[in-house]
Image (cartoon, rainbow, N blue to C red):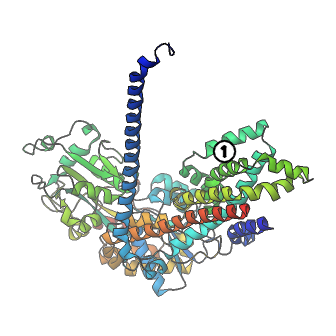
Amino acid sequence: MASASTALATPDVDAGIARRRTLDLVFQAVALLVLLAVLAALAALVYSILHDGLGRLSWDFLTSYTSRHASHAGIRPALAGSIFIIVLTAGIALPVGVAAAIYLEEYGTRSRMARLIELNIANLAAVPSIIYGLLGLGLFVRVLGFGGSILAGASTLALLVLPVVILSTREALRTVPMSLREGSYALGATKWQTIWYQVLPVALPGILTGLILALSRAIGETAPLITIGALTYVPFLPDSVWSPFTVLPIQIFNWVSRPQVEFAQNAAAAIIVLLALLLTMNATAIWLRDRFQKRRIS
Amino acid sequence: MRLGSAWLLVAGLGLAGCSKGPESPGGGTPASGAGIVRIDGSSTVFPISEAVAEEFQKVTPNAKVTVRISGTGGGFQKFCRGESDISNASRPIKPTEIEACGKAGIAFSELPVAYDGLVLVVNPKNTWVDHLTLADLKKIWAPEAQGKIMKWSQVRAGWPDRELHLFGAGVDSGTYDYFTEAVNGKEGASRGDFTSSEDDNVLVQGVATDELALGFFGIAYFEQNAAKLKAVPIDDGKDDNGKGPIAATVETVKNATYQPLARPLFIYVAHKSADRPEVKGFVEFYFAQGAALVREVGYVPLTDEGYQLAKAHFDKRVPGTIFGSGGSQVGITIEQLLARERTQ
């Protein structure tokens, strides 16, 4: 049939191609439109926040304690608490997450046990954060006796980000070519030496990117920290992992729900700070990745 | 080498915090509460306790006061586990909560600190509503009204034949508990088809932009947005506490003529904690300076006599609640509250 009517079919084929091209263009336009709509929404949000909060932002705002007078209130304990808790979360989640991923990817790949763990990790990644809060309240705050401390908060957030850290670390380990491992073995390295000196350095940028993106999620979390007993009013800075604490999202939430308009401006200013912190973290992730990639090439 | 240093960098970031390790529990840990006045509970009472804490901090620089928001119920749970010294509450303690405290051996005093008036509001463009009676409110908010009372004309003859849009407190809040008790006679009993939010600013926005709206929230939110809203005077049908419809103002809440939608707010103080000087000092400061601060953050202070009696109540460590049956109670006037305290 195809050979019999090449000439005859040409107009049909052309029409088909033209139709498909139009469809292609339409689809492209729709996709672009959706993208623009999303970006416009984001821009509107950012504009509204900057408009409300930029005027309120000052050094005093960053270094003052909170107050019932909106104009004197600041975010000092909340900012310190957020930074402290995110650093501690990273300190807990990184070694545990990377170790778990190494086990799953390099050692236990085919065992039934590993498959079961894998399935559970994938499921854990989808558990709502409030559930982690309840787990943290039961386990860290009460059973282990951490109280409503930074350590309890960081442990809870570490659990929350662990599935993501493990999954992204495994992805990173998987991108390391098998030939690299084989080369290392051929030179007489043990399995551990191969992992530590060959595989991990290559996978590090991916691991760090995954970690920092996971932490970016954690820094915006409110529900699990309120559940484990983060404070709302705390007139001093955390001085150890046992300190009571508050974090930026809780401070923002509290200000948003106050009747006075001035507190809404404070909330907007605090949101700007939180956004800046988040963007800094994401930028660090990109910087680290680039740095390690360049090193490897050179 | 290069890798080693990179790992150290990353791990060191986080582990620096861990290095103090768990060798130093007790001491300054929040669990022991030594030196820290730990306040927990209602988000409604939070601004008052925050203001008092802020001022207390100024006169006693060594004191550390922390305030946490867990809701009234959540606050009592922690209070009865000994995890807080003072519990903020927007309703009296319930029998089940008293039982929990009793089992844990936590004795406490119940101290009223302020009043909150719940204001019924409509849009300023609403020209037909001049007042509502308690019967009107019940007709509108009763569980049976769900899906039936949908138009203003159904509330009172002569009102326009237009849709009625309801806005109210979220079902987890003490405000909802109190409103349903006051209007429908049973805590938690109400229709479900209304726009509800835990954030009162959402309700303010809703009513301010909807000509057909009717909503309720705390008096502080009304005062801050008075230009965008219209308060509806309420007639409770009883003449002995003021005749006819009465508007919610600081005065009418304070002199107990705005009824039954004015509710007392409390702090509960654990006796064991009250023996610690910083807690005792804080509570005494609360009663000495509270009135002005209460007004400043938008609530209605008790009378001077009220604060003196509450202070005496605390000094004698009078235990338990003055609300025998527990839970929200309606139409508690300052006079009744004080009379009950005197009989203790």
Q: Is residue B152 above or below residue B8?
A: above
Image-based side of A238 in relation to B206, left or right: right
| Helix, strand or loop for disc 1 | helix
Residue shown at 64% from the left, 61% from the top: A289
Count every numbered label the image shows and give the total: 1
Percent position of residue B64, x then y: 54, 78
Q: Amino acid at mark 1?
A: Ile
The answer to whether residue A193 of the structure is visible from this angle is yes
Percent position of residue A236, x then y: 54, 78
Displayed quadrant of residue A139: bottom right
Displayed quadrant of residue A159: bottom right
Residue shown at 58% from the left, 57% from the top: A213
Q: Identify the residue position indicated by label 1 in the image.
A: A121
Residue shown at 39% from the left, 78% from the top: B287
Displayed quadrant of residue A253: bottom left
Image-based side of B16 in relation to B260, left or right: right
